[in-house]
Amino acid sequence: MGSGAALALLRLLAWCLLVLPPPPSAPTTAGPTPNPSASAAGPGGAPTPPQPEGLPSAAATAGSPSPTPGASQSPAGPEGETSPSSPMETPGPSPAGTGRPSTPPPPGPTATPRPGPWPQPVTDVAQLCSCDLSVDQCDINCCCDPDCTAADFSLFTACSVPVVTGDRQLCKQQEALYSMDTSVQPPKRTYQLAEKVNPSVFCIQSINYKAALSFQPPEIPTLENFDRLLQDYGGITFSTETDLMSSIESETRSATNAGETSRYEYRDPIETADGFLWLPAPIFYQCTDSNPAGFLINQDVKCNRVIKAEECATVPALSMEFYTNSSILPVPKSSRKLNITVQSIILQTLQGLRTRLGSSALLLPILDGQACSNVVLEARYQIAFTEAGEITAAAASLVLGTINPADTFIQQSFEIRFIPTVAGDDQLTMLKSTSAQDCLAVEGIRTPVLFGYNMMSGCQLRITKDSNCLLLAPALLNILKGQNFPNCVASFGNSEPQNGLDWVQIAFNVSQLNGCEIPVQLEIEVEWTKYGSLLNPQARLTSVTVTVVTAALPQVSAGSERTIPILSAVRFIDVSAAAEPGYKTRPTVEAKLPFDFFFPFV
């Protein structure tokens, strides 16, 4: 073979090496399709010398960016064109080791840079400002603008946004209050943070029915359970007494496992020997019997109960036994029991006439023809407790009536009151007025006498032809005086029981004429004086007098009634003598001079 043929063969091989793609086994990176002419010549058209294998070309080292890992290069077809079967790749440098420089990226849209993390929302009201409209400039009268200085604030006339509030969907929200203090010169901006309760949002403070936190799928009626579901939910209203009782019992068991408590806490259900003390409550004005009485929660409710006269003996809430046949535990999980004392029983006729019974025997509902008698219309509890969270006594007052056969519902009223007791000491109390205004139904409802407060209360006594003066007189006196009326009171607020001279005996004045009379008024008159220093005088009781005013029982004709007001009052009288300030006598100067003090003048 001649030298010319050999030279042509070498040129052909060199051309093939420049045009053919690299072998598939070589690692590749994303980059543009190489240009043979650009790779064959350097600056000025001079051919580029071959590069050692494994090193980047000079052009790639000087100006091309670093290769992007993870991308692959599309194979180049003849004349350096991109294969139509592969999508256009992002321009990048030539793969290392090929000895071919990269070409400029083709024109086209560039990739959008990936955004960084979003800024945290501003929840601090001290950083919120709705009137800050200018960037890096103080806005006039914008008291929350962080760009404003004290000199700027001195030129403000008022705050355009005086209140900045946070999230209005929260129960409690912070408010930043801004104002201008114009009483000083120069005027200053005042700033204050306040936390207020949102009145526009219904907030749940505590949840006592945990089953309401999760969705319970309703039971699908079937042929087997249809009668049971109809019996449970077929009425006008229905209650979740079973769920509530199981929830309370489970919570009580959990508390027992954690450790027995030796006292009642606020809102704790009052426990009885057979469960809890239940007090009917209204649900959509209708009575439900699944309301446990809570410790220290006074209640006074009224509700309507749908009833049929022939079924009165089968409804437990209409029987006196439902309210009195329970034994209260003094403390939770106690082995001791307190029976509920029946304080009074009042019978009410269909016409509304009331008569108090002399005994507290159990009366069950009786169906007489179509009418039903001895049905509980009112029930009032009085629970006495100590500061240690222990129940010491429980009493009930009941009003029983007769159901008219034509009535389809009756109205019942229930009340429970908690009365504090002082261990070892009696307390001076007086009759407390109630909404019922019935003297025979308010026995035991007392309010303490507070020093310096003149108070008056009362009730109404209904008199009928059958009213007995011999029974009413002692009953009214007990209502006015209350139980355990003291014989003496302390002259000071910190008098010790062993100091007999610090206690004042109570004097009683009873104005009674001949014959049987009933007490109509009880007045407690307390005289006190200021004792001690003029700068810090102490109150001292000097005398306590109880005056009982009686009156003859009025005569009432048959079939009618008369109402008599019964009053109770407390009056404090200041008997302090006029203060006379006393001063010590002016001191005299007793100076003794020496005998020769005036020598030589004398």
Image: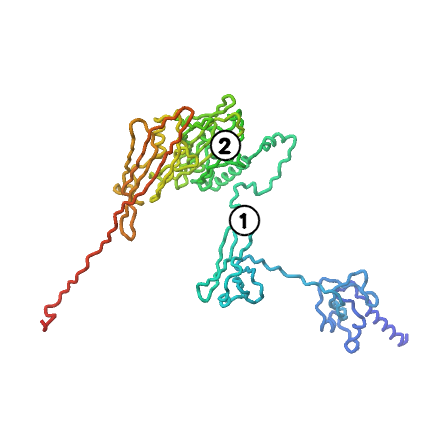
Q: x%, y% of residue 602? A: 9, 71
Q: Which sits in the foreground, 191 or 238?
A: 191
Report which quarter residue 457 is drawn in. Answer: top left
Depth check: give the residue in front, 75 or 358. 358
Q: Is residue 589 left or right of residue 350?
A: left
Which SS class for mark 2?
A: strand
- The kind of secondary structure element at disc 1 is loop
Q: Which residue is mark 2?
A: 411
Q: What's the amino acid at mark 1?
A: Ser
Number of labels in the image equals: 2
Residue 145 position by quadrant = bottom right
Q: Is residue 199 visible?
A: yes
On screen, residue 68 above or below 362: below
Task: Please indicate whether residue 530 sits to the left or right of residue 291 in the image.
Answer: left
Q: CA distance from mark 1 to mark 2?
A: 34 Å
Q: Is residue 399 above or below residue 451?
A: above
Q: Which mark is residue 200?
A: 1
Callout 2 amino acid = Gln
Whether residue 359 is visible: no
Assess disc 1: are there few (<14), some (14-19) or many (≥20) residues with their C-alpha within 10 Å of its C-alpha: few
Q: Closer to the camera, 13 or 143?
A: 143
Q: Residues within 10 Å of mark 2 (few under 14, many from 20)?
A: some
